[in-house]
Image (cartoon, rainbow, N blue to C red):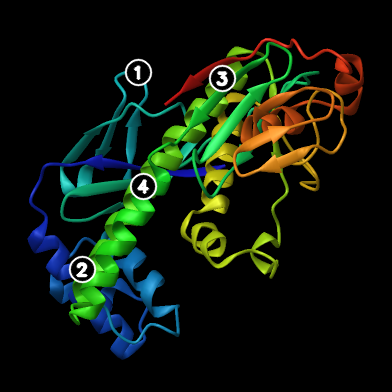
Amino acid sequence: MILTYKLKHNKDFSDELRKAKQVAEFGIKNRTLSSKDVKQFGLKSAISNQILRKYVKNKKVKSVSSVQLTIPNQGIKVDKKSRKITIPCLKLVLDYQFPDFEKINQIEIGNEYACVSVTIPDMVPEKVDNYIGVDRNTTGHIAVAANPKTGKMWKLGKSGLHTHKKYSNIRRTLQKQGKYRKVKQIKNRESRIVKDLNHKISKKIVETAKENNCGIKLEDLTGIRNNKKHTRSFNYSLNSWSFYQLQMFIEYKAKLRGVEVVYIDPHYTSKKCSICGQIGNRNGKSFKCSCGHVDHADVNAAFNIGQSIKERDLMEGNTDIPKAALSI
């Protein structure tokens, strides 16, 4: 698995970055892949080679606005004992704290950050009998996780919906004023907040599964956006929140920790009773079943996702399953 980590380098590379842009522009114009043709710009040949390969081989690139310094694996030294990365051609030393890796593929350096691409071995998922179910939502908490074995559940990402509504209103106001550049800046800010929250939610879910020796079960939501039966407000929430991004974050964090991730059919997970298996009555965030079970609809769905049919059959008729709620 290949991951990229950002490290702040605290050095001024403005001169090198200017030269890198000149190399890229010359390469695109003259379609050359030889560092000898760009040696007049004074950039290290190892870096020039990487820039030329990146921009010249891509026939779609016609111009560049900014170019990063790309250092290949051969130009990087690693001391895993002291956890330091050295780039001799730039006289740069970086301290790192990320997990152990097989090798560094390359490093891209910009004005502030060094993006380190590393190959990390996948851990073989442990075979488990129990799973934590995760219900992803467009309203309320972004994700609700439940452990059917212990009866515990976790409500995660309460601020998600508020974030979307806040920035949606700001964008609408700016669009009316014709401030389209500002609209783009606000949209990028919202994306960064969403990404950070998805990171925190996925980390909590994977850590909880690891601590409880469980796998993770998710609904297979492929094609959910193509369902035309959704209301207009639901469709907005659905397309605003990145279900796929949260899913990807859970998957790669689970691989790093050796936690199994499986997918199930989403049909009726929010309508079936997690106690008896009958179709109950869902009204907004409330769920009620004829067997007497009353629950938060998302919590009921999370327990349905996490448990197997066999587990539900064993609980049939028992409405006293303890549930402890934890929220962030």
* Earlier sequence position, callout 1 versus callout 4: 1
Camera-near label (1 vs 4) is 4
Q: Is mark 1 on a helix, strand or loop?
A: loop
Callout 1: few (<14), some (14-19), or many (20+) C-alpha neighbours within 10 Å? few
Q: Mark 3 points at which residue?
A: 208
User: Can residue 267 be seen at all in this image of the molecule?
Assistant: yes
Residue 74 seen in this snapshot: no
Q: How far apart are marks 1 and 3 (CA)?
A: 30 Å
Work out whether 1 lies above or below 231.
above
Q: Which residue in the protein does label 1 denote? A: 81
Marks 1 and 2: CB-CB under 8 Å? no
Q: Which amino acid does the dot numbered 2 rest on?
A: Ala
- In the visual, does 277 lie left or right of 29? right
Q: Where is residue 46 in the image (x, y as percent from the top left)?
A: 30, 59
| Residue 138 in picture, x, y percent from top left | 54, 50
Mark 3 vs mark 4, CA separation in Å: 25 Å
Rounded to the nearest angstrom, the CA distance separating label 1 from label 4 is 45 Å
Kindly indicate the quadrant of the structure image that contains residue 23.
Answer: bottom left
Foreground: disc 4 or disc 2: 4
**Which residue occupies 76% across, 40% down?**
281
Q: Which of marks 1 and 3 is nearer the N terminus?
A: 1
Q: Which numbered disc flags the more N-terminal residue, 4 or 2? A: 2
Rendered residue at 57%/45% (across/down): 137
Q: How far apart are marks 3 and 2 (CA)?
A: 45 Å
Location of mark 4 (residue): 162
Query: Can you say whether 79 is above or below 181 in the image?
Result: above
Q: Identify residue for label 2.
A: 20
